[in-house]
Image (tube, rainbow, N blue to C red):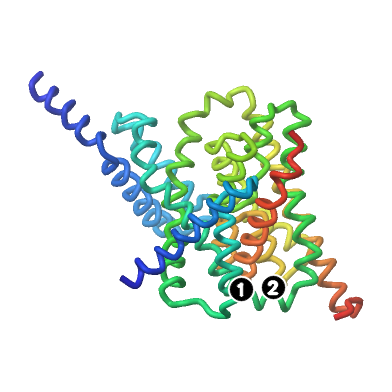
Amino acid sequence: MVLLRGFLVLVVFFLLGEALRVLVGLPISGGVLGMVMVTATLMLRGRVSDQLAEASRGLISVLVLLISPGVVGVFFIADRFAGHWFSVAVALVAGTLLSSVTTLWLMKKTAGDRTRGHSHD
Amino acid sequence: MTEFNGRMQELLLVWTAGPMLSIALTLAAFMAANWLFAKVGRPLWMPPVLMAAVILAAAVAASGIGYETYQQGARWLTVLLGPATVALGVPLYQQMHHIRALWRPILCTLPLAASLAAVYAVGIAWLMDAPLSILASLAPKSVTAPIAMGIAEQLGGSVALTLGGLLITGVLASVFVDWGAKWMKISDDRMVGFALGLNGHAIGTARAFEISPTAGAFASLGMGLTGVFTALFLPFVFPF
């Protein structure tokens, strides 16, 4: 019952997110809107119930399980992208290398400014 | 013998009429991947999601039920990605004190780094003449899967290609962030963790938890913030 109550909260927030997406016409998925609404609600309440924490931990721990049927698709529709595999591979390898190094550099620079006392807070 | 073959055909039809065969295959592949991952010493370049996908693809091909039939049954599991995305809001709330404590460097790094994670890959693919549907599939490559699938659908990309790119990006980011941190002499777990989560989503976050709990917490933060930022802004700026 404990898990089910938390799961019900998550499903209701997902439905609310879908409602917001359709009624306001936002180009963002209902799940993301539900996530933002959950975070905002928890911040307003100032605490998270055990049931909700337990249900969310459970779902997050099986994320790999929920993702894997989608990943399998890449092996079966590979032929649709046959002509573009090389550009996709280069974009992924070079793009990820560049963005990883850029993030580290930005973090080092902004955090370094803090320790040198340039920040105003 | 022919009667036996007929019975087997009938059994396959009965089994694939409902989703249970797909669910059993997916669960079994997930558990086998977790077992194998621990058995071979948790290698960085072969995360459980990649193992699970390879095992599952082999099982689907060998069982002869066909990819379309498998996918129909697996929908009973993948619909849970909706509430799973909502569930990410809970750790995001639990990490809120970290955001408050380090809001300046996080706020300075996040928009630029999260945008560049998409721009680098889309730019390179565009320079190499990849079509629009591929650019749309690559754009959310650094975003955690349930959010990325939603973004790819909104932009008109292929969910399967997005997930493939996502998987490769997560593995590469785990390796590249480690190299980059060594090369730039960064030993602060908070920075390394944030970079892992921002670029490598859930796979990078799993790697960060192996470094230290602090790195793991900052990776979750980087993953969550990148997901929200990209989901909120990419559909508005994607130029087509």
The residues tagged by marks 1 and 2 sit, at their Cα atoms, a distance apart of: 7 Å
Per the rendering, the mark at residue A6 is none
- Image position, residue A79 (x, y; %): 53, 24
Badges 1 and 2, same chain: yes
Residue to which mark 2 is pinned:
B99
Q: Quadrant of residue B205?
A: bottom right
Label 1 environment density (alpha carbons within 10 Å; few <14, some 14–19, many ≥20): some
Q: Position of residue B235 (x, y in %)?
A: 69, 44
Q: Quadrant of the C terminus of chain B?
A: top right
Q: Is residue A5 left or right of residue B205?
A: left
Q: Position of residue B228 (x, y in %)?
A: 65, 57
Label 2 resides on the chain identified as B
The three-letter amino acid code for the residue at tag 2 is: Ile
The answer to whether residue B83 is seen in the rendering is yes
Q: Quadrant of residue A121?
A: bottom right
- Residue under pointer 1: B95
- Mark 1 belongs to which amino acid? Gln
Q: Who's the residue at 37% across and 69% down the image?
A: A5
Image quarter (top left, top right, bottom left or bottom right) of the N terminus of chain B: top left
